[in-house]
Image (cartoon, rainbow, N blue to C red):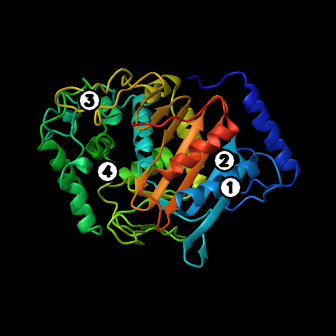
């Protein structure tokens, strides 16, 4: 994957279609401007005026069909090319009688993990650390900290078991979804179990890796993680609506979420997300910041060319093989086309992430060759299945706008 190349026919079509949309009077209404400033002027995230035909109308129809088919309460999305708005829209309701709007905030989930990976690479570019530095230098209490490196944490190759899939943990979260979990509690669930494999020898996703990476970044920089991410990521990218919270609060306007995961369809908006990743990186965002993040992280805007290569493959290709101690459902094979990068998913020609949290689903995907960004957020209706519905919609949009570059599934 290269950072830039001669525009393909599909990109020429997309850009031509965008030009036609602008000629019809469709404003660039999301955070950002016609110059692709990405939100540095703090413009409001509002819906586009939709023309009667073209890519924007196609995307809208895809979203409408998916909302009905998947039983969703709301779908919010933004598609852009070269930072220019193709379509920004919201369908359905946040709550009964309250229409969903593009400016509504929702859980950011593992999008923040992509920020952690890029923040680490920025520190490498600045000469402050090396990817193969042992984390024991900053986290002396971590078992095998002399063998686990910063690279292994960001690429999820430590062998640490995932506390989220540990028997009993999902039940504990469901029984008390408002519980405030500490980083120490979460990491201890993983570290007290036998590792899946020796550090660096295989691949498996573990939330514990990113809790530890957040702690290491704080120690390296002597800066609280939320402050560090604001300085290194959100500030430079102009992400005015992306922020951490140490409580379950969500800034207004709020996209409310509902789920039937506990057997009854109930509101889950303010269930506590403290278990999801490192304290200081438990964030909320809006759809315009999500689209901006897709382009900025996916293009390596904030990092050097060599760091961008590490972002896309820090050594995970070829890992993920099942062993006697690491079953296939955990150690998912990493190939040249589909693998885990440094806090991001490389899915064919796309760089992506798709968080999931009790009733909330989101997806960001970026196609470097076409400079195409897709951002989707969904909430569940009473008959929806809990799953990556936003990712499904992103795949369908990609199939319509860039048919030569499908977004494959991961895992």
Residue named by callout 4: 278
Mark 3 element type: loop
Q: From the top left corner, tell me how far across and down residue 180 is, in percent.
A: 26, 65
Residue 228's label in the rendered image is none
Q: Quadrant of residue 51?
A: bottom right
Label 1, residues with CA under 10 Å away: few <14, some 14-19, many ≥20: many
Measure how far apart labels 4 and 1 are at the Cα level: 30 Å
Of badges 4 and 2, the one in the foreground is 2
Label 3, residues with CA under 10 Å away: few <14, some 14-19, many ≥20: many
Horizontally, residue 201 falls left or right of residue 307, namely left
Measure how far apart labels 3 and 1 are at the Cα level: 41 Å
Whichever of callouts 4 and 2 sits on the residue coming sooner in the sequence is 2
Is there a contact, CB below 8 Å, between mark 4 and mark 2?
no
- The reply to whether residue 292 is in sight is no
Q: From the top left corner, tell me how far across and down residue 165 is, in percent.
A: 25, 48
Q: From the top left corner, tell me how far across and down residue 178 is, in percent.
A: 29, 69
Whichever of callouts 4 and 1 sits on the residue coming sooner in the sequence is 1
Residue named by callout 3: 149
Is there a contact, CB below 8 Å, between mark 4 and mark 3?
no
Residue named by callout 1: 88
Q: Is residue 378 above or below residue 315?
A: below
Horizontally, residue 132 falls left or right of residue 112, namely left
- Split into 4 quadrants, where in the image is the C terminus? top left
Residue named by callout 2: 79
Whichever of callouts 1 and 2 sits on the residue coming sooner in the sequence is 2
Label 4, residues with CA under 10 Å away: few <14, some 14-19, many ≥20: many
Instruction: Please name the residue shown 19% across and 40% down the image.
Output: 139
Instruction: Please name the residue shown 42% across and 23% down the image.
Output: 335
Measure how far apart labels 4 and 3 are at the Cα level: 17 Å
Measure how far apart labels 3 and 2 are at the Cα level: 37 Å
Nearest to the observer: residue 398 or residue 346:
398
């Amino acid at each position: 994957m290269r950072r830039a190349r001669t525009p393909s026919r599909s990109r020429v079509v997309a850009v031509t279609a965008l030009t036609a949309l602008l000629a019809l009077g469709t404003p660039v209404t999301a955070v950002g401007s016609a110059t692709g400033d990405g939100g540095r002027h703090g413009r409001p995230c509002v819906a586009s005026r939709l023309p009667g035909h073209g890519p924007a109308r196609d995307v809208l129809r895809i979203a409408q069909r998916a909302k009905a088919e998947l039983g969703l309460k709301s779908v919010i999305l933004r598609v852009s090319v070269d930072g220019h708005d193709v379509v920004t829209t919201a369908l359905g309701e946040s709550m009964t009688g309250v229409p969903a709007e593009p400016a509504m905030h929702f859980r950011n989930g593992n999008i923040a993990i992509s920020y952690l990976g890029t923040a680490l690479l920025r520190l490498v570019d600045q000469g402050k650390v090396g990817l193969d530095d042992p984390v024991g230098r900053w986290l002396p209490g971590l078992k095998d900290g002399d063998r686990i490196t910063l690279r292994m944490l960001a690429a999820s190759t430590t062998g640490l078991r995932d506390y989220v899939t540990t028997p009993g943990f999902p039940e504990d979260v469901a029984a008390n979804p408002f519980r405030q979990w500490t980083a120490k509690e979460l990491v201890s669930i993983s570290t007290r179990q036998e590792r899946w494999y020796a550090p660096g020898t295989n691949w498996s996703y573990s939330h514990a890796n990113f809790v530890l990476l957040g702690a290491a970044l704080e120690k390296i920089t002597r800066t609280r993680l939320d402050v560090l991410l604001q300085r290194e990521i959100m500030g430079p990218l102009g992400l005015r609506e992306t922020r951490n919270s140490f409580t379950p609060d969500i800034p207004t306007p709020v996209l409310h979420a509902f789920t039937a995961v506990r057997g009854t369809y109930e509101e889950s908006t303010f269930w506590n997300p403290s278990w999801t990743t490192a304290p200081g990186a438990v964030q909320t965002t809006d759809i315009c910041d999500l689209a901006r993040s897709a382009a900025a992280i996916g293009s390596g805007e904030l990092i050097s060319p060599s760091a961008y290569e590490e972002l896309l493959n820090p050594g995970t290709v070829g890992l993920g093989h099942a062993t006697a101690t690491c079953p296939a459902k955990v150690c998912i094979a990493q190939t040249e086309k589909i693998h885990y990068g440094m806090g991001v998913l490389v899915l064919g020609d796309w760089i992506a992430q798709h968080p999931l949290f009790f009733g909330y689903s989101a997806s960001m995907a970026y196609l470097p060759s076409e400079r195409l960004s897709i951002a989707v957020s969904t909430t569940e209706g009473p008959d929806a299945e809990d799953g990556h519905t936003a990712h499904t919609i992103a795949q369908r949009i990609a199939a319509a706008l860039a048919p030569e570059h499908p977004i494959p599934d991961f895992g």
